[in-house]
Amino acid sequence: MTVTQQEISAVLTRYLSTHPDRAIDVAPLADALAMPRDLASRATFPLHVTASAAGIDATGRVLMIHHRALDRWLLPGGHVEPTDRTLYGAALRELEEETGIPWQHAVSPPTHDVTPLDIDIHEIPANPAKGEPRHWHADFRFAFWLKDTDLVPQLEEVTACAWQPASELPTARLAASIAAL
């Protein structure tokens, strides 16, 4: 069973109840949810959802991966798979796949529900080799405290893993959200 439109909508609603000031930033996602399409499918264009893990160590550093195809440092994350039941679960699966950190070594900050730390909508360039046009990812980013463990990058997609200070994150808003934890 894959992530449903209802799941995406419910997580977005929780996020906006925590961060009402960010409604304008996620308006394209809210608009896409009003359309009858499968936003969990990577074949849905011009926008679909992805999930990422902001893994934080005991010193406050954040685990980043160097993405092979995009040639950028990013949070571990990626597309939702048909077997993913939740966006939160997709983020944990991607963390394990891309870094080798078992999901059992990731602990969420204590909350009453599972709310993303951030939702970022960003452009992805066209990939002719995969038949993908330029499109947008609505990336649901979940925070996890990570136990000390060895890193084993998934070399098909990742060229390196590294612990970096929050100031090195892709957006200032994400860095501020992590600092607030």
Image (cartoon, rainbow, N blue to C red):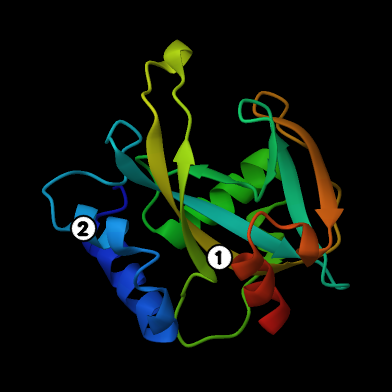
Taking the image as shown, residue 155 lies to the left or right of residue 120, namely right
Question: What residue is at 36 percent from the left and 84 percent from the top?
Answer: 17
Classify 10 Å Cα crowding around label 2: few (below 14), some (14-19), many (20 and above).
few
User: Mark 2 falls on what kind of element?
Assistant: helix
Residue that mark 2 sits on: 31
The first of marks 2 and 1 along the sequence is 2
Q: Which amino acid is tagged 2?
A: Asp
Position of residue 153 measured from the top left corner of the image (x, y, whole percent): 76, 36
Residue with the most extreme top position: 129
Question: What residue is at 42 percent from the left and 58 percent from the top?
Answer: 87
Question: Is the residue 160 above or below the residue 102 in the image?
Answer: above
Residue with the most extreme bottom position: 112
Residue 100 visible at all: no
Taking the image as shown, residue 43 lies to the left or right of residue 109, namely left
Position of residue 149 measured from the top left corner of the image (x, y, whole percent): 85, 55
**Closer mark to the observer between disc 2 and disc 1:** 2
Q: Which amino acid is tagged 1?
A: Phe
Residue that mark 1 sits on: 142
In which quarter of the view is residue 86 placed?
bottom left
